[in-house]
Image (tube, rainbow, N blue to C red):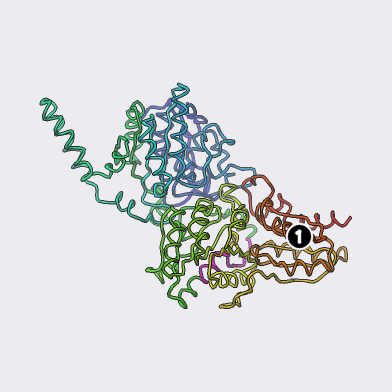
């Protein structure tokens, strides 16, 4: 059991001898525990240096070793779900020395990525996709007579999502050879919730069941008719002793639960399962953070780590303590608590994002008005619609990238019925190290085309609270989208104020070119314009648009009187985004503006820091300056 994260690279000779799983398969089964121990120690060291997902990887060390020991990867296909379980897999598949680069620009992806390695069979970031993809691969392998084995490893709460059960239902019907492994660690990012979790968490009489089954097999197998009767009876009794009845009824052969930290036993079980025909379901019980005492004790805290500082370097050149600033999520977390204290109709909903959406205090202050629905985004939105039908005021706190999964519910269940639901859309825009699977690049585009929607885009902390108030008081569906990370330190003063819907504000008045900003890139645009005023004596107009829908048409008409060009800036896809809304209005009114749109291009932006991503897209201070100067010349 490790108590501290190693400060220097540990001595891992057995692990260092493995640059490909084929070398792992040359080991004896007795060497696997030693390899697992060294893998865990190296994972502690490398993630301590780089930061990144932590607890889930520690929990699947033995399972990862056993899978690569038994299966002929990469011919045999392993699909990791959710993807942050895959750090040990990356270490064992030729990326050991690159692991400290994970999540950094040009470094390893934090999730499985097909372009990165032939061992990463399916790209993943969102949860609950593995069984669907694995079934597709298994069917294709069967049709092609390739002999490939296919394994989906699903865990960290991902089994609570509807897609997982849609896939299980089809897989049982298809009867295709495949293995689904449930990594049951009783956790997502925070605690698992819901009936399914309670089902798995019942006290298991596995020893009783196993001894009963094996004992009866020995006694009754010599009496054919009695054994046939007992076998039929067993199918009914299994559900009383194990959680396997559900999966057996879906058409799977359920095996387990088994100890996920006994690597030799796991390897033995997997060898037997590998030869079985039809859909197999292996229930593996693990502990998130296994082997690192602090992570086992505080599993939520150690879901992920920030990079550790070098103590020696700190002594030589101590870094000043950074100024603590609120994040936009913090602003939302305080607002929702304050608003709930004033309005008993407010109910808060989140799909397993309590910590990320900053709903911890709300869940403690208002436990009877807090609803964590687990990884079930579609259900979260329709649940809110049902609440709104009966006069409650639901607030759905959801990441932009996860709202994509509930788009039909947003349209069909909320907007068509014009229900009073407020969406607090977190992680809008690029998100830095988590990369394109987690980027909120499309929410403006996909919400803007939906009738009845109001879409607000706050530029700072004060505006965030103001527009949350406004969206909540609006009688209909309204979304407030804000980015990941720290805001810019603006003091919050608009405690209960609201803004006029569809109206922007002029930050500075100039002439010739008007910069229309949608959201928190406003401060970068302001910095660019201030520099241009000093360096080039340019006096341009800067507007905080506040709303994408409805857009401030009167303001745009007024700008035409003294401006020839508009530049729009947004942290959303250019196609169909806020700039497109401006262009559509200009075209519909035959206004005379020349228009330039700046935002996320028609491409996926790889993982890097947010500032590096903005610079790559040309929507940082330097990029905005360069664009303006290029249009003037």
Towards the viewer: 285 or 77: 77
Towards the viewer: 217 or 287: 217
Magenta extent: 319-335
**Residue at 20 percent of width and 46 percent of height:** 240
The answer to whether 463 appears left or right of 534 in the picture is left
SS for callout 1: helix
**Residue at 55 percent of width and 60 percent of height:** 425
Towards the viewer: 162 or 151: 162
Q: Which residue is mark 1?
A: 586
Establish if 627 lies above or below 507. above
Within the magenta stretch, is there residue 339?
A: no
The answer to whether 597 appears left or right of 492 in the picture is right
Within the magenta stretch, is there residue 327?
A: yes
Where is residue 198 shown, x and y percent of the image? 31, 53
Establish if 609 lies above or below 83. below
For the C terminus, the image quarter is bottom right
Where is residue 594 shown, x and y percent of the image? 82, 57
Quarter-wise, where is residue 572 in the image?
bottom right
């Amino acid at each position: 059991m490790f108590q501290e994260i190693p400060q220097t690279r540990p001595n891992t000779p057995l692990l260092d001898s493995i640059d490909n799983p084929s070398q792992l398969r040359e080991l004896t089964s007795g060497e696997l525990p030693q390899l697992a121990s060294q893998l865990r120690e190296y994972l502690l060291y490398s993630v301590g240096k780089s930061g990144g997902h932590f607890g889930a990887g520690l929990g699947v060390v033995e399972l990862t070793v056993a899978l690569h020991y038994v299966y002929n990867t990469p011919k045999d296909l392993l699909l990791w779900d959710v993807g942050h379980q895959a750090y040990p897999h990356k270490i064992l598949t030729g990326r050991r020395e690159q692991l400290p680069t994970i999540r950094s620009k040009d470094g390893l992806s934090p999730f499985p990525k097909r372009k990165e390695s032939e061992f990463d069979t399916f790209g993943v970031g969102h949860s609950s996709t593995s069984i669907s993809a694995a079934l597709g691969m298994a069917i294709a392998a069967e049709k092609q007579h390739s002999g490939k084995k296919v394994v989906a490893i699903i865990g960290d709460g991902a089994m609570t999502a509807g897609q997982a059960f849609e896939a299980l239902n089809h897989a049982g019907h298809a009867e295709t050879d495949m293995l689904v492994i449930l990594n049951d660690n009783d956790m997502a990012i925070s605690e698992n919730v819901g009936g399914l979790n309670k089902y798995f968490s019942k006290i298991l009489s596995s020893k009783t069941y196993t001894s009963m089954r094996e004992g009866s097999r020995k006694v009754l197998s010599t009496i054919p008719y009695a054994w046939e009767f007992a076998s039929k009876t067993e199918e009914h009794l299994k559900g009383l002793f194990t959680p396997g009845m559900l999966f057996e009824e879906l058409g799977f052969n359920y095996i387990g639960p088994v100890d996920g930290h006994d690597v030799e036993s796991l390897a033995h079980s997997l060898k037997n399962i590998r030869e079985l025909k039809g859909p197999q379901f292996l229930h593996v019980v693990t502990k998130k953070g296994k082997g690192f005492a602090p992570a086992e004790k505080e599993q939520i805290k150690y879901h992920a780590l920030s990079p550790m500082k070098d103590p020696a370097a700190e002594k030589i050149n101590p870094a000043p303590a950074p100024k603590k600033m609120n994040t936009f999520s913090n602003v939302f977390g305080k607002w929702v608590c304050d608003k709930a204290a004033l309005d008993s109709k407010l109910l808060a909903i989140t799909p397993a994002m309590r910590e990320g959406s900053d709903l911890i205090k709300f869940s403690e202050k208002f436990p009877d008005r807090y609803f964590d629905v687990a990884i079930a985004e579609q259900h979260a939105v329709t649940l809110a619609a049902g609440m709104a039908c009966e006069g409650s005021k639901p607030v759905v706190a959801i990441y932009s990238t996860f709202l994509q999964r509930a788009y039909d519910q947003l349209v069909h269940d909320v907007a068509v019925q014009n229900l009073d639901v407020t969406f607090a859309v977190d992680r809008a825009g690029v998100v830095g190290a988590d990369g394109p699977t987690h980027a909120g690049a499309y929410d403006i585009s996909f919400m803007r085309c939906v009738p009845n929607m109001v879409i607000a885009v706050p530029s700072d902390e004060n505006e965030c609270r103001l527009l949350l108030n406004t969206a909540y008081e609006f009688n209909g569906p309204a979304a407030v989208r804000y980015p990941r990370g720290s805001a810019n330190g603006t003091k919050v003063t608009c405690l209960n104020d609201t803004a006029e819907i569809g109206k922007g504000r002029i930050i500075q008045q100039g002439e010739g070119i008007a910069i229309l900003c949608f959201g928190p890139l406003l401060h970068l645009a302001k910095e660019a314009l201030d520099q241009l005023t000093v360096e080039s004596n340019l006096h341009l107009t800067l507007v905080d648009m506040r709303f994408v829908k409805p857009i401030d048409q009167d303001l745009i008409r007024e700008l035409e009187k003294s401006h020839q060009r508009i530049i729009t800036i947004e942290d959303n896809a250019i196609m169909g985004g806020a700039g497109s809304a401006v262009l559509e209005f200009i075209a519909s009114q035959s206004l005379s503006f020349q228009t330039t749109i700046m935002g996320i291009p028609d491409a996926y932006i790889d993982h890097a820091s947010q500032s590096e991503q903005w610079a790559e897209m040309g929507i940082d201070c330097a990029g905005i300056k360069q664009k303006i100067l290029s249009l003037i010349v």
